[in-house]
Amino acid sequence: MKKNKKKKKRILSLALIGIAITLIISYLCYWPIIEKKNKAADNLNIEVNTLNSEPKVSESGATGVKDEENTADTSSDFSNTLFESFLAGDIEAYRINEDGDGFTTVNIKDFNIDGEEWDSYSVYGYLDVDNDGEDELVLQGPYGACFFDAKDDKVTLFAEGSGTGATCLLAYYNKAYWIVTAHAWANGDDFYMQRYNGADNVAETFNFGSSVDENGNESYYRVNEIGEDISITKKDYTDLTNSIQPLS
């Protein structure tokens, strides 16, 4: 009986060893296939995660990795640097004389930025008010807006209000910005519109306004190309005044 038991144990041991060898051989045979499947699954997960993630935006505005080669300053960056230097008091701006002949210089201190006095100014921000594709610096003060351009290594104050009878405003009319000089009085008002194509080039101008006679009758006009007043409707007048945008 003992011999039979030992024989059975030996047979069982040999069988277990055989099974183990078979499992090892099977694993070695199927391991490359398993690895291939795992890699495929990993690649699938990467693709899914990429599709579900938000694209990175480079400094140049394109999606993908940061564009290291696109490091040149744009003209807008150049302009902003000049404006920042002016606002910091590091450089002065050139103010064009009213007659267009010559200029004077102004410093940011002359505008008393964010002061408490009635004649102080504030920095409104940046807008392409001369329609040249580059933003201009806008200050807001007691007589409306002041518009500064940055070009040729200098800052130029090219339009501003000069008193209660000459307030500088901004309009958006016919898909372009217009700089407006406005004058209002008890019996009417007058608006002088200028569309710039670059700060040194006035491309188009016209006047319009309203008046009230001694009998209280209202009339509205616009000056034509040869300087003659022509009558316009109240709706035409309202459309023009509504194009003027408050800067506040």
Image (cartoon, rainbow, N blue to C red):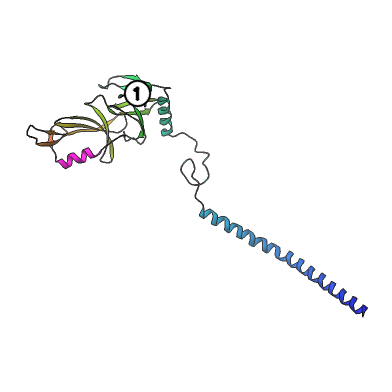
Quadrant for the C terminus, please.
Answer: top left
Per the rendered image, the range of residues in magenta is: 233-248
Quadrant for the N terminus, please.
Answer: bottom right
Is 243 magenta? The answer is: yes
The kind of residue tagged 1 is Phe
The vertical placement of 191 against 117, above or below, is below
Q: Percent x, y for residue 240? A: 21, 38
Q: Within the image, what quadrant is residue 115 found in?
A: top left
The residue tagged 1 is: 111
Q: Percent x, y for residue 117? A: 32, 23
Q: Nearer the viewer, residue 212 or 193?
A: 212
Residue drawn 85% across the image and 72% down it: 13
Q: Nearer the viewer, residue 196 or 124?
A: 124
Q: Percent x, y for residue 230? A: 12, 36
Horizontal side, residue 4 vs residue 83: left or right: right
Q: Nearer the viewer, residue 231 or 246?
A: 246
**Residue that sits furthest to the bottom in the current view:** 1
**Residue that sits furthest to the front in the current view:** 116
Question: How many marks do you count on the picture?
Answer: 1
Residue drawn 76% across the image and 68% down it: 23
Residue drawn 31% across the image and 20% down it: 103
Q: Nearer the viewer, residue 135 or 123?
A: 123
